[in-house]
Image: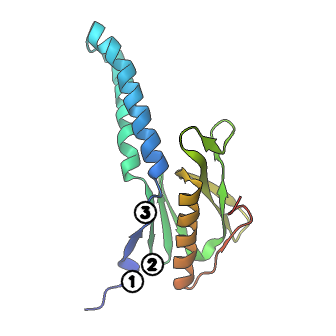
Amino acid sequence: MVTNPSRIVLPLRGSAYGARVSGTLFAVLTLLALSGPLLTYGFSVPMVPFIAYALFVGVRPWFMGGTLSGTTLEIRSWYRRYRIELAEIATIELSPYNARGQVRSLPFVGQVRILTLVMRSGSSKDYPATLGRRRRVQRIAREIVTYARSVGSDPRLGAHFSD
């Protein structure tokens, strides 16, 4: 029995690692901050949105990440899923995470980056869900390029790949 190659899904290991760590940390800190009022005043309806948000931020990153399948790169982000045809990607760049200013490094973590895809049309898009240590994001970019070339596309690593 021959397996259809477009049905094989290859996960990009570590592609949402930064989001998982930061989401879990943020959720724990938020729930710790809410524990004081919960213990002092008990549960109240106005706390529901804060608890729900903390749970969302703690759970959602575990379903995020990137996969390669057939000729498609799929990136599952915080609120949506992006499906990008590999043939449309011209260049893969690494960019600083942009959270009210460029974040190039974090304490206790080191240098961090996200993937930026430059399309053949000239447009580019950052994918913050791919936040991770610079070397991990570089490895993921190389994996995408290697896979794309194996299925007939030819994206290249951009000038900001090794920054």
Judge the density around disc 3: few (<14), some (14-19), many (≥20) Cα neighbours within 10 Å: some
Q: Image quadrant for the N terminus?
A: bottom left
Q: Of discs 1 and 3, which sits in the foreground? A: 3
Report the coloring of the rendering: rainbow
Question: Circle 3 is placed at which residue position?
Answer: 13
Report, in whole angstroms, how far the alpha carbon at label 1 lies from the one at label 3: 19 Å
- As drawn, 60 above or below 72: above
Is 123 left or right of 35, judged from the image as shown?
right
Decide if residue 78 is in sight here.
no
Which residue is nearer to you in this view: 145 or 56? 145
Q: Residue at x 36, y 77 (%)?
A: 7
Residue 136 coordinates in the image, percent (x, y): 53, 59
Task: Give the structural element (helix, strand or loop) at label 1.
Answer: helix
Judge the density around disc 2: few (<14), some (14-19), many (≥20) Cα neighbours within 10 Å: some
Q: Amino acid at mark 2?
A: Gly
Q: Are marks 3 and 2 in contact (CB under 8 Å)?
A: no
Judge the density around disc 1: few (<14), some (14-19), many (≥20) Cα neighbours within 10 Å: few
Q: Of discs 3 and 2, which sits in the foreground? A: 3
| The image quarter in which residue 3 lies | bottom left
Which residue is nearer to you in this view: 70 or 159? 159
Q: Which mark is residue 5?
A: 1
Question: Circle 2 is placed at which residue position?
Answer: 70
- The furthest residue to the top: 41
Q: Amino acid at mark 3?
A: Arg
Tell me which label, 1 or 2, sits earlier in the chain. 1
Task: Give the structural element (helix, strand or loop) at label 3.
Answer: loop
Q: Residue at x 42, y 35 (%)?
A: 25
Tell me which label, 3 or 2, sits earlier in the chain. 3
Report, in whole angstroms, how far the alpha carbon at label 1 lies from the one at label 2: 6 Å
Q: Are marks 1 and 2 in contact (CB under 8 Å)?
A: yes
Q: Amino acid at mark 1?
A: Pro
Q: Residue at x 50, y 77 (%)?
A: 71
